[in-house]
């Protein structure tokens, strides 16, 4: 796969993913799954930049990937770094968008999840990703012998449940809507001849 195409997919996918987070999820304090969800929890509770938190949580997993899943490491480290940078770079958009556009939290969760799913789907089509929890799920699957998709779902469920406990039942519900919308769009994007 040409380097330029993969690099462009990472940049475009990361930009779309960051729009989903900064414009649609952050203003209403809704979570996504995986390390993005952890980054958002740190942001909402302590004001720490979400992208920076994602990088910090990804470092141990990427070290593991270097030793156990070298190919996956190469295909995810760039996507993780660029998407984390893009999330922090576009953070000011959350204030501008919320000031001028009022949409319901449910619709915002659906649109945000769809944007995140589209960004991830574009990257997956070019054999790259944001790494993080997906790589952790692969490692845990080798230990517990559970399907990797089920393991990703379990990790996401734990993160949004934590968000529900820390914030509200509405956060839990809307976060569930977000990861469902994201999962549907990612699945559609990774089908042949779509996106």
Image (tube, rainbow, N blue to C red):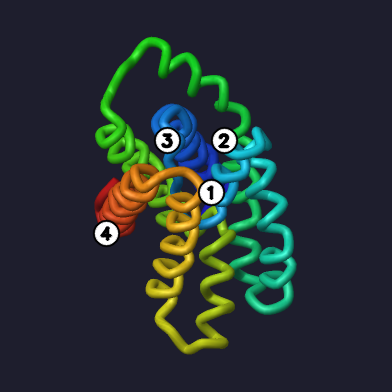
Between disc 2 and disc 4, whose residue precedes? 2
Observer-nearest of 70 and 20? 20
Distance Cα–Cα, label 4 vs label 3 = 29 Å
The quadrant in which residue 113 appears is top left
Distance Cα–Cα, label 2 vs label 1 = 10 Å
Whether residue 117 appears in this view of the structure is: no
User: Which residue corresponds to mark 2?
Assistant: 87
What residue is rendered at 62% in x and 32% in y? 88
The image position of residue 51, as x and y in percent, is: 63, 41
| Mark 2–mark 4 CB contact (< 8 Å) | no
| Mark 2–mark 1 CB contact (< 8 Å) | yes
| Closer to viewer: mark 3 or mark 2 | 3
* Vertical side of 142 occupied by 181: above or below: above
The image position of residue 120, as x and y in percent, is: 43, 50
Q: Secondary structure at mark 4?
A: loop
The image position of residue 59, as x and y in percent, is: 72, 59
Distance Cα–Cα, label 3 vs label 2 = 12 Å
User: Which residue corresponds to mark 1?
Assistant: 36
Q: Secondary structure at mark 1?
A: helix
What residue is rendered at 40% in x and 55% in y? 125
Observer-nearest of 107 and 15? 107
Between disc 3 and disc 2, whose residue precedes? 3
User: Which residue corresponds to mark 4?
Assistant: 192
Between disc 2 and disc 1, whose residue precedes? 1
User: Which residue corresponds to mark 3?
Assistant: 25
Q: Secondary structure at mark 3?
A: helix
| Closer to viewer: mark 4 or mark 1 | 1
């Amino acid at each position: 796969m040409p380097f330029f195409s993969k690099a462009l997919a990472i940049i475009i996918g990361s930009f779309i993913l960051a729009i989903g987070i900064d414009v649609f999820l952050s203003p209403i304090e809704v979570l996504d799954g995986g390390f993005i969800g952890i980054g958002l929890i740190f942001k909402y509770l302590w004001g720490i930049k979400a992208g920076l938190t994602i990088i910090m949580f990804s470092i141990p997993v990427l070290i593991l990937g270097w030793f156990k899943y070298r190919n996956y490491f190469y295909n995810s480290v760039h996507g993780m770094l660029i998407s984390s940078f893009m999330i922090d770079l576009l953070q000011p958009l959350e204030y501008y968008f919320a000031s001028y556009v009022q949409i319901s939290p449910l619709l915002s969760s659906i649109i945000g999840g769809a944007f995140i799913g589209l960004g991830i789907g574009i990257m997956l089509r070019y054999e790259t990703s944001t790494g993080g929890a997906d790589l952790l799920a692969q490692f845990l699957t080798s230990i517990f012998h559970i399907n990797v998709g089920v393991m990703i779902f379990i990790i996401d469920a734990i993160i949004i449940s934590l968000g529900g406990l820390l914030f509200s039942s509405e956060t839990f519900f809307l976060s569930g809507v977000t990861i469902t919308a994201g999962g549907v769009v990612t699945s559609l994007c990774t089908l042949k001849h779509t996106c």
